Image (cartoon, rainbow, N blue to C red):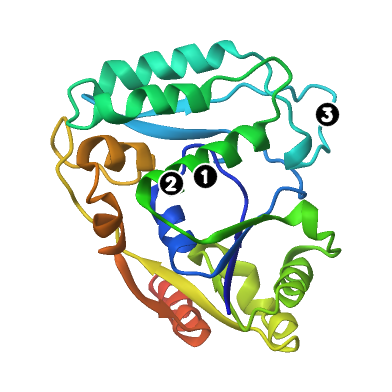
Amino acid sequence: MKIAISQPTYLPWIGYFDLIDQVDVFVLLDDVQFERRSWQQRNRIKTPTGLQWLTVPVISRGRREQLINEVEIETTAFSRDHCRAIEHNYRRAQFFEKYFDQLSSQLDCPEGTLLADLNVRLIEWFMKVLGIQTRLLLSSSLRQSGKRTELLANLCESQGADLYVSPLGSSVYLLKEKDGLLARGTDLVFQHYEHPEYKQLFPPFRPYASALDLVLNQGDPSLEILRSGRRPAFLPDEVAHQAAEKMGAQ
């Protein structure tokens, strides 16, 4: 059984949904420390001048050690501002009319809404629109202990996973600590994703925007386009070799 584990991010990019799409269970890591100005609270949309950040304001003063699932949105006014920015930049997109009202309702938050609840709701909406059937779980509901690889290993074991598909960005520490996974009977591979190009407003094409860009521009074929960027996963030795070559070239 394949599993992937990642923090719930705001309006994720398409590579995030590729990771979800290729596993049986995706665990949203919501009970680890929140990082300000990270993908957990912001992402980018395409504009005529390039990529523009959309950031969810959160209450952080005096709450430096809070977990992701404890972070409260500071003001619900962001929803109006983000919807205006999306409308301004995507109203000419082919599928804007089909999805904008749905998206607006997902972004609408009452006072006291937690950031994680918003992010999970948006991830579930994107999955529904894209047609991804993977089972989602919150790590907080699984009640596993540990940090970094120990926590990942415990989560994998709790679900009976025999293969952990990791984002490539986690290789820095996972390559050093992979024995903690292997000892639990869970093999490790790394996601290999090459961003596909598609028809996008405001040429030239800019990759790494929110998946919203793909959905509003392409509509029904979005999942097929998303999957076209998937490549065979990297084995740990391949990633280690690439890292060594990069270090040698510097």
Task: Please tell me how crowded label 2 is: few (under 14), some (14-19), or many (20+) other residues with Cα within 10 Å.
Answer: few
Q: Position of residue 109 (x, y in %)?
A: 60, 20
Q: CA distance from mark 2 to mark 3?
A: 34 Å
Left or right: residue 28 versus residue 197 is right
Identify the residue at horizontal 73%, vertical 70% (top origin). 149
Quarter assignment of residue 193 = bottom left
Q: Residue tagged by mark 2?
A: 128
Q: CA distance from mark 1 to mark 2?
A: 6 Å
Name the amino acid, label 3.
Arg
Q: Earlier in the sequence, mark 3 or mark 1?
A: 3
Q: From the image, which quarter does the C terminus lie in?
A: bottom left
Identify the residue at horizontal 47%, vertical 78% (top origin). 239
Task: Please tell me how crowded label 1 is: few (under 14), some (14-19), or many (20+) other residues with Cα within 10 Å.
Answer: some
Q: Position of residue 213 (x, y in %)?
A: 30, 37
- Asked if the residues shown at circle 1 and circle 2 are in contact, with their CB atoms under 8 angstroms apart, the answer is yes
Identify the residue at horizontal 22%, vertical 32% (top origin). 95
Identify the residue at horizontal 52%, vertical 33% (top origin). 42
Q: Position of residue 17 (x, y in %)?
A: 43, 54
Q: Residue tagged by mark 1?
A: 124
Q: Residue tagged by mark 3?
A: 63
Q: Earlier in the sequence, mark 2 or mark 3?
A: 3
Q: From the image, which quarter does the N terminus lie in?
A: bottom right
